[in-house]
Image (cartoon, rainbow, N blue to C red):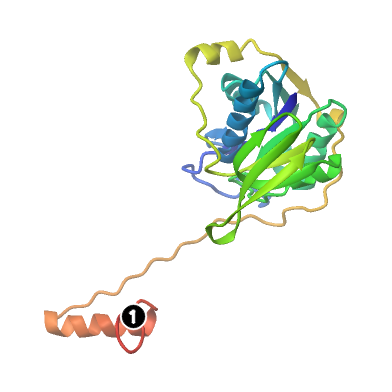
Amino acid sequence: MKILVCVKQVPDLEGRFVPNAAGTWFDESGLAFRMNDYDEFAVEEAVGLRERLGGDAEVTALSIGPDRVVETLRKAMAMGCDRGVHVRDGAAAERDPWQVASMIAGYARSRGFELILTGMQSIDRGSAQVGVLVAELLGFACTTTAVGFSCDGSTATVERELEGGAKGVVRLKLPAVVTCQLGLNTPRYPTLPNILKAKKKELLVLAPGDVGLEAPLAAASGFCRHERSASCLVLEGGADDLAGRVVAELREKTAVLRRGGAR
């Protein structure tokens, strides 16, 4: 069974984000980067499935981006992926979901993948569109937000998260695309021996044109930093007076207290 898992390198959210010179995305200089959280669940599920199926099952990790994404691909291989594919694209941050999906589908189309796993969304752009678009481009069955997964090699059974804490069960015939949500599994930690082995695993480098980059359907028109405003009210006086004034302020300016008394 051939499995493709898609991973994205994203900035660490502890970094300081400022708009770039064009005002269309953030300035990447000085930021630390790591594997997208949701993609770690996809990698773990892909590697775990290969281990359960045994035989000739194999997992390929694919990532699109500049040279630095090789670090994320090496982590995926250290977690157990058999090989990596790097679509080297210095303009990856400017690609819309349609373009990203077109490159993934372009690579996968003629290579016989039976299952494609992706994260539910990326923590930087958060569109949650790429996995679904890949399925549409390839004509694969698809389901999203998986929190439970099993596969016998021909059919996948997916437990997916719904609104209000409800869950649904979907059965898909392969080939299929599944996007992975928090709670699906616990990603393994790459051990030092596996990190060293990952450096020797095959890493194929392709250009966007090699995998059929499409023209964009959307473009970012602006990116700005949220301006926070902070203010406070200082009340002075005796305890009896202050208590009444605090209650009056809460009733007038907030919904903390409902009129008619606190609940």
Closer to the camera in the image, 238 or 41: 41
Residue 164 x/y as whole percent:
54, 61
* Residue hosting label 1: 257
Q: Is 54 left or right of 164, judged from the image as shown? A: right
Q: Is residue 17 above or below residue 47?
A: below
Residue 84 x/y as whole percent:
69, 21
* Quarter of the image with the C terminus in it: bottom left
Residue drawn at point x = 25 percent, y = 74 percent: 234
Residue 32 x/y as whole percent:
52, 34
State whether residue 48 appears in this view.
yes
Under circle 1, the secondary element is loop
Q: Residue lying furthest bottom in this view?
A: 260
Q: Quadrant of residue 181?
A: top right
Residue drawn at point x = 56 percent, y = 40 percent: 184
Closer to the camera in the image, 187 or 105: 187
Residue drawn at point x = 74 percent, y = 36 percent: 155
Q: Amino acid at mark 1?
A: Leu
Q: How many marks?
A: 1
Q: Quadrant of residue 237?
A: bottom left
Q: Dot 1, how many residues are within 10 Å of its Cα: few (below 14), some (14-19), or many (20+)?
A: some
Q: Is 32 left or right of 103, judged from the image as shown? A: left
Q: Is residue 125 above or below residue 114?
A: below
Q: Is 189 left or right of 79, judged from the image as shown? A: left
Residue drawn at point x = 32 percent, y = 71 percent: 232
Closer to the camera in the image, 225 or 257: 257
